[in-house]
Image: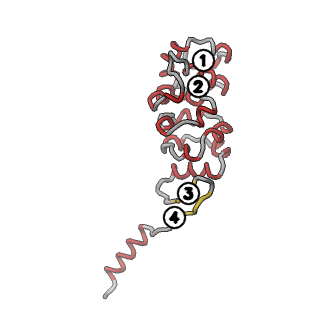
Amino acid sequence: MGYIVCGAKTTEIMQFNAIEFSKAVLWLGQLALSCSEEQLLALAGLLTNSLAFGTISSWGTEVFIEIGVLAAGLPDMAMSALVKEQIEGITPAAISMIPPAKFSVVFHQRQISMFSYEQASAVTGEQVSALSDIQRTALAMVLTPWEDRTVDFRGKSLGLALGYSPTCLILGLLLLIVLPH
């Protein structure tokens, strides 16, 4: 099937045998498909057949890993309801394929904060541009975990957490050793 799957109309995709398609998804999910959002939605719909992977809410990490880039075609409501275990399975390639407008609507800042570094790195510039400030902060926290920031995800930042820098602590210790008592 391969890349040719994106040449099918959505009405044709919906006629695919869901069971056979679920067998091919392991290979299809690894490809950088150039399908439209509607085509990806139709392809993901095939995976929800009871004889394929079943309802999205029952999918675990392993299903998301197996379907790969096809996770980008999940319906908005299903994607916005994903839990940590499911988010962990979304491949970076799938993250990068989600249209920016959809990305900003389906991923709440709490979900973005669950991304791995690899997933957060896959977020495109266009997707970042579509995010709210609080969503961008959540993404930045994943990309820069060494920065100690306190954020209230109910809507406002509490600012940077104050603390001593390691350099200041070392210099202070050196001064205690070097200076005469």
Q: Determine contact: label 1, label 3, CB under 8 Å.
A: no
- The residue closer to the viewer here, 113 or 69, is 113
**Marks 2 and 4, the one that precedes in the sequence:** 2
Q: Determine contact: label 2, label 1, CB under 8 Å.
A: yes
Residue identified by numbered label 2: 33
Residue identified by numbered label 1: 5
Mark 2, other Cα within 10 Å: few <14 / some 14–19 / many ≥20: some
**Marks 3 and 4, the one that precedes in the sequence:** 3
Q: CA distance from mark 3 to mark 4?
A: 9 Å
When asked about the image quadrant of residue 101, the answer is top right
Looking at the picture, how far across and down is residue 92, in whole percent?
Answer: 52, 36
Q: Disc 1 vs disc 4: which is toward the camera?
A: 4
Q: CA distance from mark 3 to mark 2?
A: 36 Å
Name the amino acid type tagged 3. Val
Could you tell me which residue is drawn at 59 percent across and 25 percent down? 33
Q: CA distance from mark 2 to mark 1?
A: 9 Å
Name the amino acid type tagged 4. Ala
**Marks 3 and 2, the one that precedes in the sequence:** 2
Looking at the picture, how far across and down is residue 140, in whole percent?
Answer: 56, 51
Q: CA distance from mark 1 to mark 4?
A: 50 Å
Mark 1, other Cα within 10 Å: few <14 / some 14–19 / many ≥20: some
Q: CA distance from mark 2 to mark 4?
A: 43 Å
Q: Disc 1 vs disc 3: which is toward the camera?
A: 3
Mark 3, other Cα within 10 Å: few <14 / some 14–19 / many ≥20: some
In the image, which disc is placed on residue 151?
3
Residue identified by numbered label 4: 161
Q: CA distance from mark 1 to mark 3?
A: 43 Å
Q: Secondary structure at mark 1?
A: helix
Name the amino acid type tagged 1. Val
Q: Secondary structure at mark 2?
A: loop
